[in-house]
Image (cartoon, helix red, strand yellow):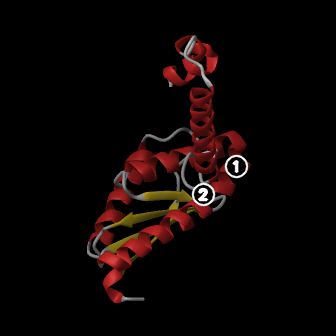
Amino acid sequence: QHAAQSLSEGAMDYVLKGFMDARTLGRVLRTALERNTFEGLADLLRDPMTGLYTREGLQTLGARCMEEARRTGESMVLICALFENLQTLRDGFGPGAADHALRDIATLLAGSCRRSDLVARLGPAQFAVLAVDAIAPSAPVMRQRLEKHLVVHNQTRSPWGPIDLRLAVGAWSGRDGR
């Protein structure tokens, strides 16, 4: 991050001083454009409040994972979570408390998964975790892990009360051929 900031503040001008020909300038501009385009596309797939993937991000990346699972015969587990008391929290404590709780849920879900799993915010109070290359028997284990993390989180929660999540879990195998 410091390097990117240094470059944006003019360090690149100093580094390239005396070496800037048309070819180098073209390469630098192409690289900058590609990087900005990629980061811009990645930002479109992320929820700005939680940093999780959006519904579109999950659909895009999930479809790719499903194609791969179909090809290799791998399995996937999907956990859907509904934040049941979001509106109650918002009404009782204001939008700031609700936003804080949404970020807490994002952290809780991401912390309960592997780095390779896709975690998304599908709507105002809906979340999903897509565990790629996870076998069906691991679905209950994943649910229990998430529920345990939620219990611990709710015991140390701020004064506005616990987070109530309703969970649904399903599994799919690429070997099914559907």
Residue under pointer 2: 54
> In the depicted view, which residue is nearer to us: 172 or 178?
178
Give left or right: position of 146 versus 60.
left
> In the depicted view, which residue is nearer to us: 175 or 31?
31
Q: Is residue 158 above or below residue 147?
A: above
Labels 1 and 2: the sequence-earlier one: 2
Q: In this view, does 58 lie above or below 35?
A: below
Q: Give the tally of numbered discs.
A: 2
Give left or right: position of 155 versus 99.
left
Going 55% across and 65% down the picture, which residue do you hit?
A: 60
Going 42% across and 68% down the picture, which residue do you hit?
A: 65
Give left or right: position of 165 versus 93.
left
Q: Position of residue 28 (x, y in %)?
A: 58, 30
How many C-alpha atoms fall within 10 Å of the one at disc 2: few (<14), some, or many (≥20)? many
Q: Position of residue 167 (x, y in %)?
A: 47, 68
Residue under pointer 1: 90
